[in-house]
Image (cartoon, helix red, strand yellow):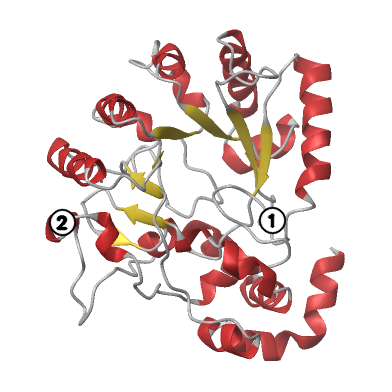
Amino acid sequence: MALQETALPILNNAWGLAHDFERVLKDNGCGALVREEITTLQVNAGKLCNQACHHCHVEAGPKRTEIMTREVAERILELLSAGPSITTVDITGGAPELNSNFQWIVRESHKLGRHVIDRCNLTVLFEPGQERLAEFLAQHGVEIIASLPCYTAENVDQQRGRGVFEKSIHALQRLNGLGYGAPGSNLMLNLVYNPLGASLPPPQEKLEADYKKHLYERFGIQFHRLFTLANMPIKRFAAFLNQGGKYESYMGLLVNHFNSTTVPKLMCRSLVSVGWDGKLYDCDFNQMLDIEMGESGKALTIWELDSFASLIGNRIGTGSHCFGCTAGAGSSCGGSLQ
């Protein structure tokens, strides 16, 4: 609440700046965002999901039909094999596991020696046909980054749906039983926190300690890291803000807490995002806003590349949503930037 109060006195100026992220970069002595060496390939397997969370910037849900085909998946793997600098394949959705090509992508990426991340909502482990999913992930050493926006049932169910917290706890216990999250284990299990409403995340280190204490004492659950992410003011969360008349104040909060020290660590500098249809984006958020790579309004796709390395040095597309990654301690797919 205190963060919102400090933002409000200069809200009018902040709201004007929110439309010009590039100007704020310049005013703070930061150069334009340019892609450096690409180390992470983020693959959006589609928007189909077994949940429909209030904060979801993808607007994923059970009725979405956008899904990556085998043809697109095979082309991605062709390009991946030609790009040795890419060490991590980060698979997201929706619930990426619901794509019939998910396990094929994992296996083929694993064969190429890449580290694979699964952005998992936990409850998908109990969906029909996913009975052996947890064992599959463990067998291939897949890092799991799992959504758990709070360690209490009330807050989780409010944001993600009734009964989600209980299922998530059972899923975490099952993963622990396979060796995920144990101290010294190579089976990485990380959790993700995002605020329930229009506020910035609290300090990551302290919240991680709270999560670990609470989850272990109540449920015997262990995990490696907690990543704190800011809610992005786009899609479903933007609609939530507008309904409550809080969109402008939230943008003011983000702009007024712009932190120039986060800029060198922004994930878009070393990441390429591939959409379910093969279009290329600078990040997952640009993907959801249809801010495509390419010039003259023509989208760049995986079919037009010889290698991902050809994207190094390209200017990164920005917008007002970029303040969500640069406010406070910063926010990325790997959590806080400080």
Disc with the residue nearer the chain's start (2 vs 1): 1
Nearest to the eye among marks 2 and 1: give it: 2
**How many marks are shown on the rendered structure?**
2
- Residue, far top: 177
Residue shown at the point (48%, 55%) measured from the top left: 57
- Residue, far right: 2
Q: Residue type at mark 1: give it.
A: Gly
Instruction: From the viewer's perspective, tell me whether residue 107 is left or right of residue 264.
Output: left
Local SS, label 1: loop
- State the residue position of label 1: 197
Which quadrant of the view contains residue 107? Answer: top left
Q: Position of residue 71 (x, y in %)?
A: 12, 40
Residue shown at the point (33%, 27%) measured from the top left: 110
- State the residue position of label 2: 306
Which quadrant of the view contains residue 154? Answer: top right
Query: Relative to 21, does residue 306 appear above or below in the rendering?
Result: above
Local SS, label 2: loop
Query: Relative to 280, does residue 93 appear above or below in the rendering?
Result: above
Q: Position of residue 46 (x, y in %)?
A: 31, 43
Q: Residue type at mark 2: give it.
A: Asp
In this orientation, does residue 200 appear?
A: yes
Q: Position of residue 267 (x, y in %)?
A: 51, 58
**Where the N terminus falls, by quadrant?**
bottom right
Q: Position of residue 11 (x, y in %)?
A: 73, 84
**Where the C terminus falls, by quadrant?**
bottom right
Residue shown at the point (82%, 67%) measured from the top left: 3
Instruction: From the viewer's perspective, tell me whether residue 248 is left or right of residue 293.
Output: right
